[in-house]
Image (spheres, grey):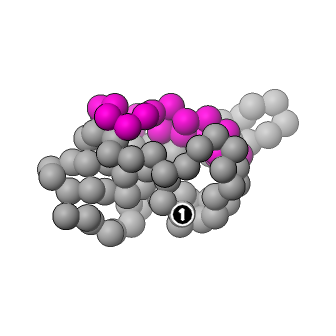
Amino acid sequence: MRCRHFFDVAQINLEKKGKTMAQEVRAPLAGSIWAVLVEVGSKVEEDDELVVIEALKMENPVYSHCAGTVKEIKVKKGDKVEDDDLLMLIE
């Protein structure tokens, strides 16, 4: 079963890296990474699906809250994550 609601609770924080600002994409809930839908260097738009987290037998997509380029991915398929774990950085 696929849950298609938007996670407003996914926190995005600013991280200062030299002259650029990176957006942190964090896990909105604990679970297992079911799929990583982007790669480093991918261009993303606001509301693009980035990662799918499986929790309570439901697939929960995590969406981008900004447009940019995926700078770093901190998780891979099968990883266990906790609420508020860092998933990726977008510049």
Q: Using the rendered image of the protein, determine whether residue 60 is visible from the camera's viewpoint.
A: yes
Q: Quadrant of the N terminus?
A: bottom left
Quarter location, residue 7: bottom left
Side of 17 relative to 70 (left or right): right
* Residue furthest bottom in the image: 4
Say which of 8 and 53 sits in front: 53
- Residue 85 vertical position relative to residue 37 in the rendered view, above or below: above
- Residue 73 vertical position relative to residue 53 in the rendered view, above or below: above
Q: Percent from the top left, x then y, of residue 80?
A: 29, 32
Circle 1: is it few (<14), some (14-19), or many (20+) Cα within 10 Å? some
* Residue that appears at 73% across and 42% down: 21
* Residue that appears at 56% across and 59% down: 65
Q: Amino acid at mark 1?
A: Asp
Q: Percent from the top left, x then y, of residue 69?
A: 70, 49
Q: Is residue 80 magenta?
A: yes
Quarter location, residue 44: bottom right
Side of 88 relative to 19 (left or right): left
Q: Is residue 90 magenta?
A: yes
* Residue furthest left in the image: 56
Q: Percent from the top left, x then y, of residue 2?
A: 26, 64
Q: Secondary structure at mark 1?
A: loop
Side of 80 relative to 68 (left or right): left
Q: Using the rendered image of the protein, determine whether residue 81 is visible from the camera's viewpoint.
A: no
- Tell me how many marks there are: 1
* Residue that appears at 15% across and 52% down: 57
Say which of 9 and 37 sits in front: 37
Q: Which residue is mark 1?
A: 48
- Residue 85 vertical position relative to residue 29 in the rendered view, above or below: above
Side of 31 relative to 14 (left or right): left
Q: What are the residue bounds of the magenta stretch?
A: 70-91
- Residue 74 vertical position relative to residue 25 in the rendered view, above or below: above
